[in-house]
Amino acid sequence: MDLYCFLSASDPANCGVSRGCTETVCLYDCKDDIRSHLRSCHLSKENVDEYKLILARAGLFDLSDDQICKMGICPKHRHRLGRYWLKSKTTCQYPGHVGNSKKVVGRDTFSIKMSEEVRNLPYIYLYDKLRLINPSGRKYLP
């Protein structure tokens, strides 16, 4: 069975080779030890597999094991959303913001559970390139 990166449709420019890895693998097989990475992100209390972390960072929380087993991921996306993910050094993530950035000072972080709860709030809108999307999937122009 040929596997394609599940993020290739939304982020095709970033698909590809990373750190000497060239093959797209089944997402469910991504089970590397990520404990040191979680500690560096102040998420050491989380007990999560690599593939679940990748899905959470992609904003996908409610997938069945069957669905996950059918998904592939390229090495570049696996590394960018997994153990080599770089946390933000600034607090402001608004695209095009021209003001001064402030460094993150505290150690407070969002847990995966908190991220899922925020994602499921009915009136949270996510900025995605040039359009706003609400959790129901309806698209709104800015």
Image: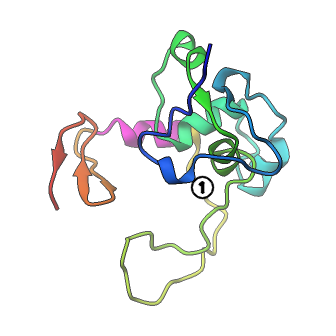
Magenta stretch containing residue 120, yes or no?
Answer: yes
Left or right for 125, reference 29: left
Identify the residue under disc 1.
109
Tag count: 1
Query: At x 68% / y 32%, what residue is drawn?
Result: 24
Above or below residue 85? Residue 89 is below
Coloring scheme used: rainbow
Q: Residue 45: give x, y in percent of width and height.
A: 73, 41
Q: Residue 79: give x, y in percent of width and height.
A: 71, 47
Q: Quadrant of the N terminus?
A: top right
Range of magenta residues: 113-121
Where, by quadrant of the figure, is residue 40 drawn? bottom right
Q: Main secondary structure of the magenta part?
A: helix
Above or below residue 31? Residue 91 is below
Above or below residue 17? Residue 92 is below
Query: At x 48% / y 43%, what residue is drawn?
Result: 115
Left or right for 54, reference 91: right
Q: Quadrant of the C terminus?
A: bottom left
Query: At x 77% / y 28%, what residue is drawn?
Result: 31
Q: Amino acid at mark 1?
A: Thr
Where, by quadrant of the figure, is residue 86 drawn? bottom right
Above or below residue 90? Residue 50 is above
Q: Residue 118: give x, y in percent of width and height.
A: 39, 43
Task: State the residue in front, 116 or 50.
Answer: 50
Magenta stretch containing residue 65, yes or no?
Answer: no
Disc 1 element: loop
| Residue lying farthest to the left in this orientation | 141
Label 1 environment density (alpha carbons within 10 Å; few <14, some 14–19, many ≥20): few
Q: Residue 9: give x, y in percent of width and height.
A: 42, 39
